[in-house]
Amino acid sequence: MGRLAETEGLTDIQEEILKTVRQFVDEKVIPVAQELEHADEYPTEIVEGLKELGIFGLMIPEEYGGLGESLLTYALCVEEIARGWMSVSGVINTHFIVAYMLMQHGTEEQKQKYLPKMATGEVRGAFSMSEPGLGSDVSAVSTKATKQADGSYEITGQKMWLTNGGSSTLVAVLTKTDEGAESVYKNMTTFLVEKTPGFGETAQGVTVPGKIDKMGYKGIDTTEMIFEGHKISADQILGGTPGKGFFQMMDGVEVGRVNVAARACGLAIRGFELGIAYAQQRQTFGKKIAEHQAILFRLAEMGTKVEVSHNMMVRAARLKDTGKRMDVEAGMAKMVASEYANEVVEDSFRIHGGYGYSKEYEIERIMREVKFMLIGEGTSDIQKMIIGRSLLKDYKS
Ligand SMILES: Cc1cc2nc3c(=O)[nH]c(=O)nc-3n(C[C@H](O)[C@H](O)[C@H](O)COP(=O)(O)OP(=O)(O)OC[C@H]3O[C@@H](n4cnc5c(N)ncnc54)[C@H](O)[C@@H]3O)c2cc1C
Protein backbone atom coordinates (compact mmCIF):
# COMPACT_ATOMS: atom_id res chain seq x y z
CA MET A 1 0.00 0.00 0.00
CA GLY A 2 2.97 2.32 -0.23
CA ARG A 3 3.17 4.95 2.48
CA LEU A 4 -0.53 5.41 3.22
CA ALA A 5 -2.48 3.88 6.11
CA GLU A 6 0.62 2.75 7.95
CA THR A 7 0.26 2.14 11.69
CA GLU A 8 3.14 2.98 13.97
CA GLY A 9 4.03 1.12 17.15
CA LEU A 10 2.61 -2.29 16.34
CA THR A 11 4.05 -5.35 18.07
CA ASP A 12 5.76 -8.11 16.10
CA ILE A 13 2.70 -10.31 16.66
CA GLN A 14 0.36 -7.65 15.28
CA GLU A 15 2.62 -7.17 12.25
CA GLU A 16 2.68 -10.92 11.67
CA ILE A 17 -1.12 -11.27 11.93
CA LEU A 18 -1.64 -8.37 9.52
CA LYS A 19 0.85 -9.73 7.04
CA THR A 20 -0.93 -13.09 7.04
CA VAL A 21 -4.35 -11.50 6.62
CA ARG A 22 -3.10 -9.19 3.82
CA GLN A 23 -1.67 -12.17 1.97
CA PHE A 24 -4.91 -14.12 2.43
CA VAL A 25 -6.89 -11.15 1.05
CA ASP A 26 -4.59 -10.69 -1.95
CA GLU A 27 -4.55 -14.39 -2.82
CA LYS A 28 -7.97 -15.69 -1.79
CA VAL A 29 -10.37 -12.77 -1.64
CA ILE A 30 -9.61 -10.15 -4.31
CA PRO A 31 -9.41 -12.66 -7.20
CA VAL A 32 -12.90 -14.06 -6.53
CA ALA A 33 -14.75 -11.11 -4.97
CA GLN A 34 -16.16 -9.66 -8.18
CA GLU A 35 -17.57 -12.95 -9.43
CA LEU A 36 -19.06 -14.03 -6.11
CA GLU A 37 -20.54 -10.59 -5.51
CA HIS A 38 -22.21 -10.45 -8.90
CA ALA A 39 -23.63 -13.93 -8.33
CA ASP A 40 -24.70 -12.94 -4.77
CA GLU A 41 -23.00 -16.15 -3.65
CA TYR A 42 -21.99 -16.85 -0.05
CA PRO A 43 -18.17 -16.89 0.28
CA THR A 44 -18.02 -20.33 1.93
CA GLU A 45 -14.36 -21.07 1.12
CA ILE A 46 -13.23 -17.64 2.28
CA VAL A 47 -15.12 -18.06 5.56
CA GLU A 48 -13.47 -21.45 6.10
CA GLY A 49 -10.10 -19.80 5.48
CA LEU A 50 -10.88 -17.10 8.05
CA LYS A 51 -11.74 -19.80 10.57
CA GLU A 52 -8.35 -21.42 9.98
CA LEU A 53 -6.61 -18.08 10.48
CA GLY A 54 -8.38 -17.71 13.83
CA ILE A 55 -10.15 -14.50 12.80
CA PHE A 56 -13.43 -15.48 14.48
CA GLY A 57 -11.64 -15.63 17.82
CA LEU A 58 -9.21 -12.77 17.31
CA MET A 59 -10.42 -10.74 20.29
CA ILE A 60 -11.78 -13.58 22.41
CA PRO A 61 -9.50 -14.10 25.46
CA GLU A 62 -7.07 -17.03 25.34
CA GLU A 63 -8.75 -18.68 28.35
CA TYR A 64 -11.84 -19.12 26.12
CA GLY A 65 -9.86 -20.41 23.16
CA GLY A 66 -9.32 -17.16 21.26
CA LEU A 67 -6.18 -15.21 20.37
CA GLY A 68 -6.83 -12.51 22.98
CA GLU A 69 -5.86 -9.71 20.62
CA SER A 70 -6.76 -6.02 20.96
CA LEU A 71 -9.49 -4.02 19.26
CA LEU A 72 -6.73 -2.34 17.25
CA THR A 73 -5.51 -5.67 15.83
CA TYR A 74 -9.08 -6.61 15.05
CA ALA A 75 -9.81 -3.27 13.34
CA LEU A 76 -6.63 -3.43 11.24
CA CYS A 77 -7.56 -6.95 10.11
CA VAL A 78 -11.06 -5.72 9.21
CA GLU A 79 -9.52 -2.89 7.19
CA GLU A 80 -7.46 -5.42 5.23
CA ILE A 81 -10.44 -7.72 4.68
CA ALA A 82 -12.76 -4.90 3.55
CA ARG A 83 -10.04 -3.78 1.14
CA GLY A 84 -10.53 -7.16 -0.51
CA TRP A 85 -14.31 -7.45 -0.25
CA MET A 86 -16.48 -5.52 2.18
CA SER A 87 -19.05 -8.33 2.49
CA VAL A 88 -16.46 -10.63 4.04
CA SER A 89 -15.83 -8.12 6.82
CA GLY A 90 -19.60 -8.23 7.40
CA VAL A 91 -19.40 -11.95 8.12
CA ILE A 92 -17.19 -11.32 11.12
CA ASN A 93 -18.61 -7.96 12.21
CA THR A 94 -21.81 -9.08 13.95
CA HIS A 95 -20.00 -12.16 15.26
CA PHE A 96 -17.40 -9.90 16.84
CA ILE A 97 -20.04 -7.61 18.39
CA VAL A 98 -21.88 -10.54 19.99
CA ALA A 99 -18.61 -12.02 21.29
CA TYR A 100 -17.64 -8.60 22.65
CA MET A 101 -21.01 -8.20 24.40
CA LEU A 102 -20.60 -11.65 25.94
CA MET A 103 -17.06 -10.81 27.08
CA GLN A 104 -18.18 -7.53 28.66
CA HIS A 105 -21.63 -8.38 29.97
CA GLY A 106 -22.15 -12.17 29.91
CA THR A 107 -22.30 -14.35 33.02
CA GLU A 108 -19.36 -16.72 33.52
CA GLU A 109 -21.65 -19.57 32.51
CA GLN A 110 -22.61 -17.81 29.26
CA LYS A 111 -18.97 -17.08 28.48
CA GLN A 112 -18.00 -20.73 29.06
CA LYS A 113 -20.92 -21.91 26.96
CA TYR A 114 -20.45 -19.72 23.91
CA LEU A 115 -17.02 -18.08 23.65
CA PRO A 116 -14.92 -21.20 22.94
CA LYS A 117 -17.29 -22.21 20.13
CA MET A 118 -17.39 -18.64 18.83
CA ALA A 119 -13.58 -18.58 18.77
CA THR A 120 -13.54 -21.48 16.30
CA GLY A 121 -16.46 -20.16 14.28
CA GLU A 122 -18.63 -23.16 15.19
CA VAL A 123 -21.13 -20.79 16.80
CA ARG A 124 -21.71 -17.71 14.65
CA GLY A 125 -23.18 -14.50 15.98
CA ALA A 126 -25.71 -11.96 14.72
CA PHE A 127 -27.14 -9.01 16.59
CA SER A 128 -30.57 -7.53 16.26
CA MET A 129 -31.82 -4.16 17.39
CA SER A 130 -33.51 -2.82 14.25
CA GLU A 131 -37.17 -3.44 13.40
CA PRO A 132 -39.27 -2.49 10.36
CA GLY A 133 -40.34 0.71 12.15
CA LEU A 134 -37.04 1.73 13.73
CA GLY A 135 -33.30 1.85 13.25
CA SER A 136 -31.82 5.07 14.63
CA ASP A 137 -34.39 5.34 17.41
CA VAL A 138 -33.53 2.22 19.37
CA SER A 139 -35.72 3.28 22.31
CA ALA A 140 -38.78 2.52 20.14
CA VAL A 141 -38.10 -1.26 20.13
CA SER A 142 -41.45 -3.05 20.17
CA THR A 143 -40.49 -6.75 20.08
CA LYS A 144 -41.78 -7.92 23.42
CA ALA A 145 -40.43 -10.52 25.83
CA THR A 146 -43.15 -11.40 28.32
CA LYS A 147 -42.33 -13.14 31.58
CA GLN A 148 -44.21 -16.41 32.14
CA ALA A 149 -45.41 -17.90 35.43
CA ASP A 150 -42.47 -20.36 35.46
CA GLY A 151 -39.89 -17.54 35.16
CA SER A 152 -39.18 -18.11 31.47
CA TYR A 153 -40.03 -15.58 28.72
CA GLU A 154 -41.96 -15.55 25.46
CA ILE A 155 -40.72 -13.34 22.63
CA THR A 156 -43.08 -11.95 19.98
CA GLY A 157 -42.34 -9.31 17.34
CA GLN A 158 -40.55 -8.59 14.11
CA LYS A 159 -36.89 -7.76 13.65
CA MET A 160 -35.33 -6.29 10.50
CA TRP A 161 -31.95 -6.01 8.80
CA LEU A 162 -30.09 -8.82 10.56
CA THR A 163 -26.65 -9.13 9.02
CA ASN A 164 -25.89 -12.89 9.06
CA GLY A 165 -29.52 -13.52 10.07
CA GLY A 166 -29.55 -16.77 8.09
CA SER A 167 -26.02 -18.08 8.66
CA SER A 168 -25.80 -17.30 12.38
CA THR A 169 -26.62 -19.71 15.19
CA LEU A 170 -26.66 -17.25 18.10
CA VAL A 171 -28.52 -13.95 17.91
CA ALA A 172 -28.35 -11.19 20.53
CA VAL A 173 -31.88 -9.78 20.34
CA LEU A 174 -32.98 -6.53 21.96
CA THR A 175 -36.50 -6.76 23.37
CA LYS A 176 -38.86 -4.72 25.46
CA THR A 177 -39.54 -6.18 28.90
CA ASP A 178 -41.63 -4.82 31.73
CA GLU A 179 -39.23 -4.00 34.56
CA GLY A 180 -41.53 -1.35 35.98
CA ALA A 181 -38.84 1.28 35.37
CA GLU A 182 -39.85 4.83 34.47
CA SER A 183 -37.14 5.15 31.85
CA VAL A 184 -37.82 3.31 28.60
CA TYR A 185 -34.09 2.53 28.43
CA LYS A 186 -34.32 0.40 31.57
CA ASN A 187 -37.20 -1.67 30.24
CA MET A 188 -35.13 -3.39 27.60
CA THR A 189 -33.45 -6.76 27.77
CA THR A 190 -31.01 -8.57 25.47
CA PHE A 191 -31.70 -12.28 24.94
CA LEU A 192 -29.26 -14.80 23.51
CA VAL A 193 -31.43 -16.66 21.02
CA GLU A 194 -30.14 -19.98 19.67
CA LYS A 195 -31.22 -21.09 16.22
CA THR A 196 -30.15 -23.35 13.39
CA PRO A 197 -28.52 -21.80 10.31
CA GLY A 198 -30.70 -21.33 7.24
CA PHE A 199 -34.14 -20.01 6.41
CA GLY A 200 -37.72 -20.83 7.37
CA GLU A 201 -38.44 -21.92 10.95
CA THR A 202 -34.93 -21.94 12.43
CA ALA A 203 -36.04 -22.50 16.05
CA GLN A 204 -39.39 -22.87 17.80
CA GLY A 205 -41.25 -19.63 17.04
CA VAL A 206 -38.30 -18.07 15.13
CA THR A 207 -38.73 -17.63 11.38
CA VAL A 208 -36.13 -16.20 8.99
CA PRO A 209 -38.13 -15.56 5.81
CA GLY A 210 -35.24 -15.20 3.32
CA LYS A 211 -32.50 -12.88 2.14
CA ILE A 212 -33.26 -9.19 1.58
CA ASP A 213 -32.19 -8.22 -1.94
CA LYS A 214 -29.70 -5.35 -1.58
CA MET A 215 -27.90 -2.94 -3.94
CA GLY A 216 -24.51 -4.08 -2.63
CA TYR A 217 -23.04 -5.92 0.37
CA LYS A 218 -23.98 -9.04 -1.54
CA GLY A 219 -22.91 -12.61 -0.91
CA ILE A 220 -23.78 -12.47 2.77
CA ASP A 221 -27.29 -12.72 4.12
CA THR A 222 -29.25 -9.80 5.53
CA THR A 223 -32.65 -10.89 6.80
CA GLU A 224 -35.79 -10.25 8.77
CA MET A 225 -36.52 -12.38 11.84
CA ILE A 226 -40.03 -13.07 13.06
CA PHE A 227 -40.73 -14.12 16.63
CA GLU A 228 -44.06 -15.80 17.35
CA GLY A 229 -44.21 -16.87 20.97
CA HIS A 230 -40.57 -18.01 21.07
CA LYS A 231 -40.09 -19.65 24.48
CA ILE A 232 -36.76 -18.84 26.09
CA SER A 233 -35.26 -19.47 29.51
CA ALA A 234 -34.29 -16.56 31.76
CA ASP A 235 -30.75 -18.07 31.67
CA GLN A 236 -30.51 -16.70 28.13
CA ILE A 237 -30.74 -13.08 29.30
CA LEU A 238 -27.33 -11.53 28.57
CA GLY A 239 -25.69 -11.04 31.96
CA GLY A 240 -28.57 -12.78 33.75
CA THR A 241 -30.40 -9.58 34.78
CA PRO A 242 -33.22 -8.01 32.74
CA GLY A 243 -33.39 -4.26 32.08
CA LYS A 244 -29.80 -3.80 30.93
CA GLY A 245 -30.28 -4.53 27.23
CA PHE A 246 -30.14 -1.01 25.88
CA PHE A 247 -26.83 -0.21 27.57
CA GLN A 248 -25.31 -3.55 26.55
CA MET A 249 -26.31 -2.96 22.92
CA MET A 250 -24.93 0.59 22.93
CA ASP A 251 -21.63 -0.74 24.26
CA GLY A 252 -21.56 -3.27 21.41
CA VAL A 253 -22.42 -0.63 18.84
CA GLU A 254 -19.64 1.65 20.10
CA VAL A 255 -16.93 -0.87 19.24
CA GLY A 256 -18.99 -1.66 16.15
CA ARG A 257 -18.41 1.95 15.07
CA VAL A 258 -14.65 1.45 15.09
CA ASN A 259 -15.29 -1.67 13.07
CA VAL A 260 -17.39 0.20 10.46
CA ALA A 261 -14.74 2.93 10.34
CA ALA A 262 -12.15 0.21 9.62
CA ARG A 263 -14.34 -1.22 6.86
CA ALA A 264 -14.72 2.24 5.34
CA CYS A 265 -10.93 2.67 5.50
CA GLY A 266 -10.50 -0.62 3.65
CA LEU A 267 -12.87 0.48 0.90
CA ALA A 268 -11.17 3.87 0.62
CA ILE A 269 -7.74 2.23 0.37
CA ARG A 270 -8.95 -0.05 -2.41
CA GLY A 271 -10.64 2.86 -4.19
CA PHE A 272 -7.39 4.81 -3.99
CA GLU A 273 -5.27 1.86 -5.19
CA LEU A 274 -7.51 1.30 -8.21
CA GLY A 275 -7.69 5.00 -9.02
CA ILE A 276 -3.96 5.67 -8.86
CA ALA A 277 -3.20 2.59 -10.94
CA TYR A 278 -5.73 3.50 -13.62
CA ALA A 279 -4.54 7.12 -13.73
CA GLN A 280 -1.09 5.90 -14.74
CA GLN A 281 -2.38 3.63 -17.52
CA ARG A 282 -5.01 5.72 -19.25
CA GLN A 283 -3.90 8.32 -21.75
CA THR A 284 -5.82 11.35 -23.01
CA PHE A 285 -4.62 14.30 -25.04
CA GLY A 286 -1.20 12.69 -25.45
CA LYS A 287 -0.35 12.00 -21.82
CA LYS A 288 -1.24 9.83 -18.86
CA ILE A 289 -4.32 11.19 -17.13
CA ALA A 290 -2.32 11.31 -13.85
CA GLU A 291 -0.34 14.10 -15.47
CA HIS A 292 -3.42 16.30 -15.84
CA GLN A 293 -3.48 18.48 -12.78
CA ALA A 294 -7.18 17.85 -12.11
CA ILE A 295 -6.49 14.13 -11.71
CA LEU A 296 -3.27 14.72 -9.75
CA PHE A 297 -5.11 16.95 -7.28
CA ARG A 298 -7.89 14.40 -7.01
CA LEU A 299 -5.33 11.70 -6.13
CA ALA A 300 -3.75 13.98 -3.55
CA GLU A 301 -7.11 14.59 -1.89
CA MET A 302 -7.97 10.89 -2.00
CA GLY A 303 -4.66 9.94 -0.36
CA THR A 304 -5.12 12.58 2.33
CA LYS A 305 -8.61 11.32 3.12
CA VAL A 306 -7.32 7.74 3.38
CA GLU A 307 -4.68 8.91 5.81
CA VAL A 308 -7.00 10.99 8.00
CA SER A 309 -9.59 8.20 8.21
CA HIS A 310 -7.02 5.55 9.06
CA ASN A 311 -5.46 7.63 11.82
CA MET A 312 -8.80 8.52 13.41
CA MET A 313 -9.87 4.88 13.34
CA VAL A 314 -6.58 3.75 14.89
CA ARG A 315 -6.84 6.39 17.62
CA ALA A 316 -10.38 5.34 18.58
CA ALA A 317 -9.34 1.66 18.72
CA ARG A 318 -6.27 2.48 20.83
CA LEU A 319 -8.34 4.53 23.28
CA LYS A 320 -10.70 1.60 23.78
CA ASP A 321 -7.76 -0.77 24.27
CA THR A 322 -6.40 1.40 27.05
CA GLY A 323 -9.81 1.45 28.73
CA LYS A 324 -10.42 5.14 28.07
CA ARG A 325 -13.74 6.68 27.13
CA MET A 326 -14.05 6.87 23.34
CA ASP A 327 -17.69 7.57 22.46
CA VAL A 328 -16.79 10.83 20.71
CA GLU A 329 -13.70 9.40 19.02
CA ALA A 330 -15.58 6.30 17.79
CA GLY A 331 -18.40 8.48 16.44
CA MET A 332 -15.94 10.87 14.76
CA ALA A 333 -13.93 8.01 13.27
CA LYS A 334 -17.06 6.33 11.94
CA MET A 335 -18.47 9.55 10.48
CA VAL A 336 -15.25 10.77 8.89
CA ALA A 337 -14.17 7.37 7.55
CA SER A 338 -17.56 6.60 6.02
CA GLU A 339 -18.06 10.04 4.46
CA TYR A 340 -14.49 10.13 3.15
CA ALA A 341 -14.69 6.57 1.85
CA ASN A 342 -17.71 7.58 -0.20
CA GLU A 343 -15.82 10.58 -1.59
CA VAL A 344 -12.63 8.63 -2.31
CA VAL A 345 -14.48 5.83 -4.04
CA GLU A 346 -16.51 8.29 -6.10
CA ASP A 347 -13.31 10.10 -7.12
CA SER A 348 -11.79 6.80 -8.17
CA PHE A 349 -14.96 6.06 -10.13
CA ARG A 350 -14.62 9.42 -11.91
CA ILE A 351 -10.95 8.66 -12.72
CA HIS A 352 -12.09 5.42 -14.38
CA GLY A 353 -14.29 7.35 -16.83
CA GLY A 354 -16.81 5.13 -18.62
CA TYR A 355 -15.02 1.94 -17.57
CA GLY A 356 -15.97 2.56 -13.95
CA TYR A 357 -19.56 1.93 -14.99
CA SER A 358 -18.69 -1.49 -16.41
CA LYS A 359 -19.22 -4.55 -14.24
CA GLU A 360 -15.79 -5.76 -15.38
CA TYR A 361 -14.13 -3.16 -13.19
CA GLU A 362 -13.83 -3.53 -9.43
CA ILE A 363 -14.74 0.09 -8.79
CA GLU A 364 -18.32 -0.65 -9.93
CA ARG A 365 -18.78 -3.06 -7.01
CA ILE A 366 -17.05 -0.80 -4.50
CA MET A 367 -19.26 2.13 -5.54
CA ARG A 368 -22.31 0.12 -4.45
CA GLU A 369 -20.73 -1.30 -1.31
CA VAL A 370 -19.44 1.97 0.09
CA LYS A 371 -22.96 3.41 0.41
CA PHE A 372 -23.67 1.05 3.30
CA MET A 373 -20.89 2.67 5.34
CA LEU A 374 -23.12 5.75 5.61
CA ILE A 375 -25.84 3.70 7.33
CA GLY A 376 -24.46 0.82 9.40
CA GLU A 377 -23.86 1.35 13.16
CA GLY A 378 -25.69 4.67 12.98
CA THR A 379 -25.96 7.22 10.17
CA SER A 380 -23.75 10.32 10.07
CA ASP A 381 -26.68 12.33 11.48
CA ILE A 382 -26.77 10.03 14.49
CA GLN A 383 -22.98 10.26 14.92
CA LYS A 384 -23.31 14.05 14.90
CA MET A 385 -25.93 13.85 17.65
CA ILE A 386 -23.65 11.66 19.78
CA ILE A 387 -20.56 13.80 19.16
CA GLY A 388 -22.37 17.12 19.60
CA ARG A 389 -24.14 16.17 22.83
CA SER A 390 -20.99 14.79 24.35
CA LEU A 391 -18.95 17.87 23.40
CA LEU A 392 -21.60 20.12 24.92
CA LYS A 393 -21.22 18.24 28.21
CA ASP A 394 -17.43 18.48 28.09
CA TYR A 395 -17.36 22.15 27.16
CA LYS A 396 -20.30 23.26 29.35
CA SER A 397 -20.00 26.96 30.06
C1 LIG B 1 -27.45 -3.89 4.82
C2 LIG B 1 -27.86 -3.54 6.20
C3 LIG B 1 -27.45 -4.33 7.28
C4 LIG B 1 -27.86 -4.03 8.58
N1 LIG B 1 -27.51 -4.86 9.61
C5 LIG B 1 -28.05 -4.66 10.83
C6 LIG B 1 -27.83 -5.61 11.90
O1 LIG B 1 -27.07 -6.58 11.75
N2 LIG B 1 -28.48 -5.42 13.07
C7 LIG B 1 -29.31 -4.36 13.29
O2 LIG B 1 -29.86 -4.25 14.39
N3 LIG B 1 -29.51 -3.43 12.31
C8 LIG B 1 -28.91 -3.56 11.10
N4 LIG B 1 -29.14 -2.65 10.10
C9 LIG B 1 -30.02 -1.50 10.35
C10 LIG B 1 -29.28 -0.19 10.45
O3 LIG B 1 -28.59 -0.13 11.68
C11 LIG B 1 -30.31 0.94 10.28
O4 LIG B 1 -30.78 0.89 8.93
C12 LIG B 1 -29.73 2.28 10.60
O5 LIG B 1 -29.50 2.41 11.98
C13 LIG B 1 -30.68 3.41 10.19
O6 LIG B 1 -31.97 3.18 10.66
P1 LIG B 1 -33.24 3.28 9.68
O7 LIG B 1 -32.93 2.53 8.46
O8 LIG B 1 -34.44 2.89 10.45
O9 LIG B 1 -33.34 4.81 9.32
P2 LIG B 1 -34.12 5.90 10.19
O10 LIG B 1 -33.77 5.81 11.61
O11 LIG B 1 -35.55 5.84 9.83
O12 LIG B 1 -33.49 7.24 9.59
C14 LIG B 1 -33.90 7.78 8.32
C15 LIG B 1 -33.13 9.09 8.09
O13 LIG B 1 -33.45 10.02 9.13
C16 LIG B 1 -32.24 10.46 9.77
N5 LIG B 1 -32.52 10.65 11.19
C17 LIG B 1 -33.14 9.78 12.04
N6 LIG B 1 -33.23 10.32 13.27
C18 LIG B 1 -32.63 11.52 13.22
C19 LIG B 1 -32.39 12.57 14.17
N7 LIG B 1 -32.74 12.45 15.45
N8 LIG B 1 -31.76 13.69 13.75
C20 LIG B 1 -31.37 13.81 12.47
N9 LIG B 1 -31.57 12.88 11.51
C21 LIG B 1 -32.19 11.75 11.88
C22 LIG B 1 -31.23 9.34 9.52
O14 LIG B 1 -29.91 9.84 9.59
C23 LIG B 1 -31.62 8.92 8.11
O15 LIG B 1 -31.03 9.81 7.19
C24 LIG B 1 -28.68 -2.90 8.82
C25 LIG B 1 -29.06 -2.08 7.72
C26 LIG B 1 -28.67 -2.39 6.44
C27 LIG B 1 -29.13 -1.50 5.30
Image: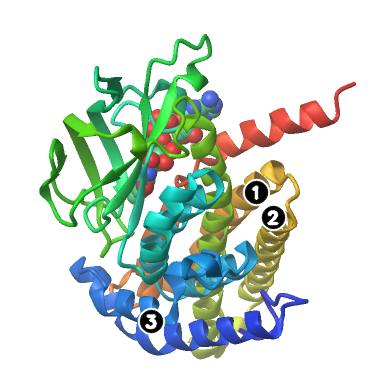
Q: Is residue 10 shown to the viewer in this render?
A: yes
Residue 236, image x, y percentages: 34, 39
- Quarter placement of the C terminus: top right
Q: Amino acid at mark 2?
A: Ala
Tell me the CA gap for discs 2 and 3: 28 Å
Q: Which residue is mark 1?
A: 330
Residue 316, labelled with which disc?
2
Front: mark 2 or 3: 3
Residue at x-position 28% and y-position 73%:
359
Estimate how packed mark 1 is, as few (under 14), some (14 to 19) or many (20 or more) residues with alpha carbons within 10 Å.
Answer: many
Q: Which residue is mark 3?
A: 52
Picture quarter containing residue 344?
bottom right
Residues at marks 2 and 1 touching, judged by CB atoms closer than 8 Å: yes
Tell me the CA gap for discs 2 and 1: 5 Å
Residue 336, image x, y percentages: 63, 52
Residue at x-position 23% and y-position 68%:
42
Residue 121, image x, y percentages: 35, 68
